[in-house]
Amino acid sequence: MAVTREIVRTHDVVKTYYMGTEEVHALQGVTTSISAGEYVSIMGPSGSGKSTFFNMVGGLDKPTSGEVYIDEVDVSQLDVYELAWLRCRKIGYIFQTFNLIPVMNAIENVSLPMVFAGKSSDECRDKAAELLKKVGLGDRLTHRPIEMSGGQQQRVAIARSLANDPAIILADEPTGNLDLKTGQEIIALLTQMKEEQGVTIITATHDHKMLAASDRVVWFTDGKVVRVQNREELNIQVGTIDGED
Amino acid sequence: MSQVQESIFGGDRSEKRLEKVPLRKAWDMCVQNLRNRRGRYMLVFISIAVVVSFFVITLTYQRMLTELRKNEDVHTRAVMQRAGLVLTDEDAAIKQRDRMIWLLILSGSLAFVGVTNTMYMSVTERYREIGTLKCLGALDGFVVQLFIIESVLIGLVGSTIGALLGFILTLLQVGMTLEFGLLGWRVVLVGFGAGVPAAILGGTVLTVLASIYPTVAAARMKPVDAMRVEV
């Protein structure tokens, strides 16, 4: 096994929102570390701060205090061009609501991050088609999101997140809008991508199905990490409905 | 299982910055977007065209009448007299001018409200899309560039359609209330010059201005906030 490297490290991250005059303490001192190639699930009830944490790690939001290091670089020290580069080349995002561009077909959606990375049109198209085939949508290349099911849209989103061969994939409730079976397929696909590409996967979820695939589970409550469990400690012998496992 | 990945920020830091996407690419994306959204933009074009044409009609019609009044020709005078469009004294002339100013203010503000509201809505309904683009690595400047090119195109097309439509309607109006025979090249040219270029320019500038504010606001937002906006 290769030497593990810390790809994400947070130190005492605090995030406070102001809603009107009221202070909301979304994160209250979160210190964690995630190694390269890990599949980490962040679990917790809604409002526990997991999405906020997630946005910090993805460079989508800045902490009120504390530091977020991506590969030992403090994200808050990056200028806009570096931050855009990080989002574009090194982090792939998957959202609960898919967030595909509605007027673009599958190929165009997957090409977008590559366009931002400055690749040529031909290169974008070829790579996008290849990725879509990999996620099982080889016959849906020119379909628009509206012509696809939720599961298929999420597959397009996964292909898009892989477009620039990122080091980290951040998936915020990727199965939240999907039915049980489709959700499992998406989890299987993510696991497969982790194995094949060696990409680090971080998901925020309250879907217990996702536990089985995780190397580690970080539990959040009220903006704090309350428990970290390794795979071995998880009792994941949960039966599935169709009984395939 | 996995090999050791090369460090994200390893090597030269100066290469780890995103370059600006070339203008050509932004143009391609705009054209693609306009083509793909033609159904939705049809409404935008129509709203802009309708208000611009109303503005052109008020501007051009009065200008053409003024031009016709200068004409000493007996037949022209007779036709204008029959239509009750000959100004008998100074009082009537002032009244006529006041009415025209009112009409212009009215149609001008209608065009302003119509165009700004249409553009504002068409940008705000895409906040989520802007947030997504930023997550995928779009720079703020690129988002603004994209929407400005798009609004220039929309403004130009919408206002041109509107201005030409308005001008044709004016010709019909003059022809029907007076006589088509009176529409000599001079009258037509004066009318065209008075309304059409100004309306195309004004409509386009208004369209761009109206979309700049929401675009810049959205581009400056943190991606998460932009995606959370409910319209």
Image (cartoon, coloured by chain):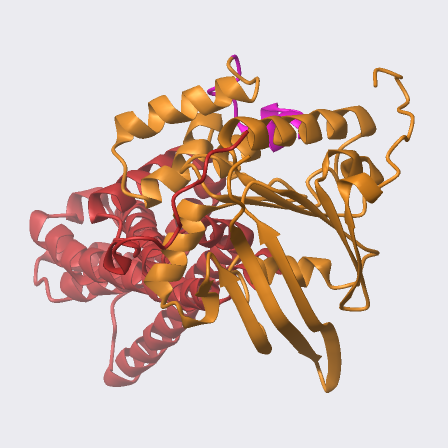
Chain colours: A orange, B red
Q: Position of residue A38 (x, y in %)?
A: 61, 42
Depth check, front residue: B152 or B1: B1
Quarter placement of the C terminus of chain B: bottom right
Q: Which residue is rendered at x = 29% and y = 83% of the image?
A: B94
Left or right, B78 with respect to A172, comes to left
Left or right, A142 with respect to B160, comes to right
Q: Position of residue A142 (x, y in %)?
A: 46, 20
Q: Is residue A139 visible?
A: yes
Quarter placement of the N terminus of chain B: top right
| Start-end of magenta stretch | A139-155
Number of numbered discs on residues = 0
Left or right, A120 with respect to A14, comes to left
> In the rendered image, which quarter is residue B107 located in?
bottom left
Q: Is residue A144 in the magenta section?
A: yes
Q: Is residue B83 visible?
A: no
Depth check, front residue: B114 or B207: B207
Instruction: From this view, report whether residue A186 is shown above or below residue B83.
Output: above
Instruction: From this view, report whether residue A234 is shown above or below residue A194.
Output: below
Left or right, A186 with respect to B167, comes to right
Residue furthest to the top:
A139
Depth check, front residue: B213 or B179: B213
Q: Which residue is rendered at x = 41% and y = 26% of the image?
A: A128
